[in-house]
Amino acid sequence: MSIVKDLLHSESDGSLSFGNHELPAKEKVEDFRFNGKSLKVKTFKDITKLESDGELVYESVPGTSVNNLVVTDNGMRFRVEGANDAQITVGLKPDTEYEVLVSGSDAGRMKTNLGGKLSVSVELEGCGTVDVEVREA
């Protein structure tokens, strides 16, 4: 997987790629139009955050590079890369149970809080890319 040099862009398959975990200082892209929504990304080695119309879509600590993010009515999927293991928080439906798959393995069922946030730890150090899928149970 390659680092997203332009920080945020849409792919030909309709997915999004964003973030750059190798940046030493924070950079951002605002007002990126995608499917009628305004996206904003902030990224560098310590954090990567994607918002859609002011709502959280994705956040990782430390920063990550994300390719092929697809958000559906029932969840999301993406490929993630980082120099270190990461805590990833995604914005989904409030108070809903989801199945989480990391590299095709079942990471268990998790329930979002009342704000719709779900957090998962992902081992990235020395792994290259990791596929993550979150789908409504």
Image (spheres, helix red, strand yellow):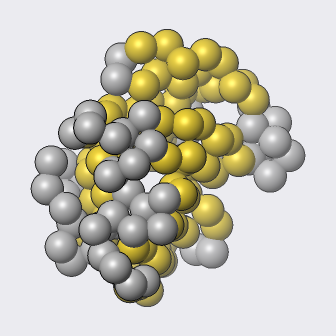
Tell me the residue at 75%/37% (across/down).
Answer: 112
Query: Is 47 left or right of 17, judged from the image as shown?
Result: right
Tell me the residue at 52%/31% (across/down).
Answer: 134
Q: Position of residue 39 (x, y in %)?
A: 46, 74
Query: Is 128 left or right of 35, judged from the image as shown?
Result: left
Can residue 33 be spotted in the picture? no
Q: Is residue 36 above or below residue 17?
A: below
Q: In this view, does 42 lie above or below 52?
A: below
Q: Is residue 110 above or below residue 85?
A: above
Q: Where is residue 27 in the image (x, y as percent from the top left)?
A: 38, 85
Count of numbered marks:
0
Query: Is 86 left or right of 91, judged from the image as shown?
Result: left
Can residue 96 be spotted in the picture? yes
Q: Where is residue 107 in the image (x, y as percent from the top left)?
A: 54, 18
Give 20 or 97, whichever is nearer the viewer: 20
Give 33 or 129, whichever is nearer the viewer: 129
Q: Position of residue 56 (x, y in %)?
A: 61, 62
Q: Is residue 16 above or below residue 80?
A: below
Tell me the residue at 32%/52% (across/down).
Answer: 83
Query: Is 119 left or right of 4, judged from the image as shown?
Result: right
Tell me the residue at 75%/29% (across/down).
Answer: 111
Which quarter of the picture shows residue 51? Answer: bottom right
Q: In which quarter of the image is the C terminus?
A: top right
